[in-house]
Image: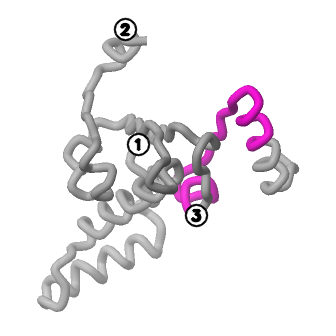
Amino acid sequence: GDQPFSELLEEFEEESTRDGAILFGVMRGRCAEGMNFSDDLARAVLIVGIPFASAKDLKVTQKRKYNDDCRRSGSIKLSGTEHYRLSALRAANQAIGRIIRHINDHGAVILLDKRFLGQFDSLSKWIKDSIEPQPLTAQEAEEKL
């Protein structure tokens, strides 16, 4: 809406300390990268899908082609597809990092996309060492609620 972002964050902080609150954000946006939601400001992050950049974006297609060309010539090892995948996982790592801001902080990380199952090696070491995969169908997840 028309509400400045700083006012929205102030309202979120007030509500979260009083009754709890949910703040929705988009991947690669302000809330997913660079914001500090330590302690009781955030106790969970829910990521729906791997945050791939638009495959049709000109910068993305050019970077993929550049990497592929350089890989063929032997000057780099990372293909365009691999760079694209790692860039998406880097964005997920940034979002995950919003809730754990210091050694005594804690929170839940929920990754709602089965494609994450094969990507744990590309997540940050601190999360990868404590992750407990629980692949569920929608029906199984509903039954656990």
- Extreme residue in the front direction: 104
- What crowding class fits label 2: few (fewer than 14 Cα within 10 Å), some (14-19), or many (20 or more)? few
Mark 1 or mark 3: which comes first in sequence? Answer: 3
Relative to the observer, which residue lies in front, 51 or 124?
124
Tell me the CA gap for discs 1 and 2. 22 Å
In the image, residue 58 above or below residue 5: below
What residue is at 17 percent from the left and 91 percent from the top?
A: 75
Q: Secondary structure at mark 2?
A: helix
Where is mark 3, residue-wise?
34
**Quarter-wise, where is residue 55 in the image?**
bottom left
Left or right: where 8 falls relative to 36: right
Left or right: where 105 falls relative to 133: right
Q: Position of residue 81 (x, y in %)?
A: 25, 66
**Quarter-wise, where is residue 73 in the image?**
bottom left
Relative to the observer, which residue lies in front, 89 or 43?
43
Left or right: where 113 falls relative to 28: left
Decide: marks 2, 3 in contact (CB < 8 A)? no
Q: Position of residue 87 (x, y in %)?
A: 37, 65
Relative to the observer, which residue lies in front, 2 or 55?
2
Nearer the observer: mark 1 or 2; the answer is 2
Q: Which mark is residue 9?
A: none
Relative to the observer, which residue lies in front, 78 or 105?
105
Decide: marks 1, 3 in contact (CB < 8 A)? no
What residue is at 24 percent from the left and 48 percent from the top?
A: 129
Q: Specify whether residue 26 is painted magenta.
A: yes
Tell me the CA gap for discs 1 and 3. 20 Å
Q: Which mark is residue 143?
A: 2
What's the amino acid at mark 3? Gly
Left or right: where 143 falls relative to 70: right
Mark 2 or mark 3: which comes first in sequence? Answer: 3
